[in-house]
């Protein structure tokens, strides 16, 4: 047993681990939906700004995506609290040791996200919907994308360090740097980033569909967003599948053998492979028939199903990696705390659904000034 691994919390956990595993998957997917817009959207905006920023449609599209960024980033942070807490409950002694070993690099996430937040607001002020790209906005969107890419790398490194205590001694003694020398690091990082671009592409298409339906004066920009969003989503999904194969290979044959056929989590992950392929076909069909919203919504539904399956595979990989290190957890039933969480969680989702519906149906405040 690794001497750096502390014992589990002696107070125990209030419910069986399977409940926390289920809730961690659910809340992680909700977090990823918004987080991927921030990460993938920042990359898309940077590419669009540098390559197409002088075009009116691209300028309007970028401005619209930037204006949504603060809300999406706030939701990503808020939705990210619950899955981190569930990791703490089940794998706290591994997660926190990984945080301590990374030290300043882990804490730098706060500063990086704050800096990105401020840059987004500067871009909103300096990038009106009707204006084209400038040197300041081009530098701003590029810097913003780089900050979010760095945050994504830190999180990926932390995830691998959490799941592989065998690296801790070398990092603790100074023989190894905090960047884990694991073969899966870069494939896993690319898997995260490219997947984020796929989700952000669908976000872009939905925002474009909203412009077509409710804002006729931005209908052309909306059509451009639908077209580009679907192209981004389809291309990223294709590369995501290829990178996923490489990521799986770098795990090593021992983990792959333990992973394959391992219970309900593996079944969910296997189903997500099929839904990702069907989603890709649906995206291609939506590109061929951009005026058919059913194909777009079908792509989104299948992609969300894929996210759930991938989250199940992620949890299974963590369980396999730590099975030789995890100690049995003491269960001290406390139904009131779980009930309180469920009530507030469902109420929060209901409020979120209402706000999204409200934002989808209400006219934009800028309509009056642009009319």
Image (tube, rainbow, N blue to C red):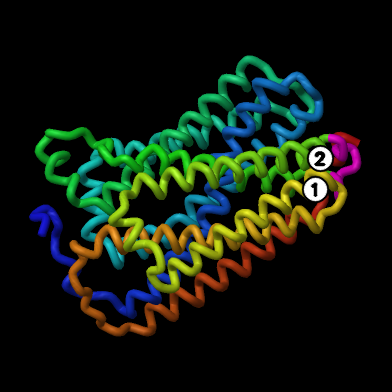
Q: Is residue 172 magenta?
A: no
Residue at 41% across, 58% down: 314
- In the rendering, at what x and y percent does residue 97 appear? 21, 51
- In the rendering, at what x and y percent does residue 147 appear? 46, 32
Q: Main secondary structure of the magenta part?
A: helix
Q: Which residue is mark 1?
A: 209
Q: Which residue is mark 2?
A: 222
Residue at 60% across, 45% down: 237
> On the picture, is 196 further left or further right than 218?
left
Quarter-wise, where is residue 81 in the image? bottom left
Residue at 50% across, 40% down: 193
Tell me, yes or no, if residue 70 can be seen here: no
What element does badge 2 sit on? Answer: helix
Q: Is residue 69 above or below residue 332?
A: above
Residue at 81% across, 40% down: 222
Q: Residues within 10 Å of mark 1 (few under 14, many from 20)?
A: many
Q: How many marks?
A: 2
Q: Earlier in the sequence, mark 2 or mark 1?
A: 1
Q: Do the residues under discs 2 and 1 have CB atoms within 8 angstroms?
A: yes
The stretch of residues the image draws in magenta is 212-220
Q: Residues within 10 Å of mark 2 (few under 14, many from 20)?
A: many
Quarter-wise, where is residue 349 in the image? bottom right
């Amino acid at each position: 047993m690794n001497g750096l691994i502390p014992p589990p919390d002696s107070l125990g956990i209030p419910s069986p681990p399977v409940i926390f595993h289920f809730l961690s998957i659910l809340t992680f997917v909700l977090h990823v939906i918004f987080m991927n817009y921030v990460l993938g959207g920042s990359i898309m905006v940077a590419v669009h700004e540098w390559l197409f920023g002088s075009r009116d449609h691209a300028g309007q599209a970028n401005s619209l995506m930037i204006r949504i960024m603060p809300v999406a980033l706030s939701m990503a942070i808020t939705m990210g609290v619950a899955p981190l807490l569930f990791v703490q409950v089940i794998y706290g002694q591994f997660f926190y040791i990984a945080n301590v070993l990374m030290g300043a690099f882990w804490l730098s996430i706060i500063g990086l996200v704050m800096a990105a937040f401020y840059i987004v607001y500067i871009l909103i002020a300096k990038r009106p919907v009707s204006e084209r790209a400038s040197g300041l906005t081009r530098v701003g969107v590029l810097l913003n994308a780089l900050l979010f890419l760095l945050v994504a790398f830190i999180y990926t490194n932390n995830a691998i360090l959490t799941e592989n205590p065998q690296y801790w001694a070398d990092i603790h003694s100074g023989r190894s740097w905090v960047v884990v020398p694991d073969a899966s690091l870069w494939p896993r990082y690319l898997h995260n980033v490219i997947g984020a671009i796929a989700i952000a592409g669908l976000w872009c298409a939905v925002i474009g569909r909203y412009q077509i339906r409710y804002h006729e004066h931005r209908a052309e920009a909306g059509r451009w967003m639908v077209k580009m969003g679907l192209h981004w989503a389809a291309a990223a999904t294709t590369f995501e599948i290829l990178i996923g194969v490489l990521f799986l290979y770098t795990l090593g044959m021992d983990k792959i053998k333990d992973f394959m056929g391992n219970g309900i989590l593996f079944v969910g992950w296997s189903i997500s492979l099929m839904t990702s392929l069907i989603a890709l076909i649906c995206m291609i069909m939506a590109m061929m028939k951009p005026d058919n919203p059913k194909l777009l919504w079908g792509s989104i539904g299948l992609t969300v199903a894929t996210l759930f399956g991938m989250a199940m595979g992620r949890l299974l990989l963590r369980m396999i990696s730590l099975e030789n290190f995890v100690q049995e957890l003491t269960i001290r039933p406390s139904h009131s705390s779980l009930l309180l969480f469920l009530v507030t969680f469902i109420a929060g989702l209901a409020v979120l659904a209402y706000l999204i519906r409200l934002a989808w149906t209400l006219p934009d405040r800028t309509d009056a000034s642009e009319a």
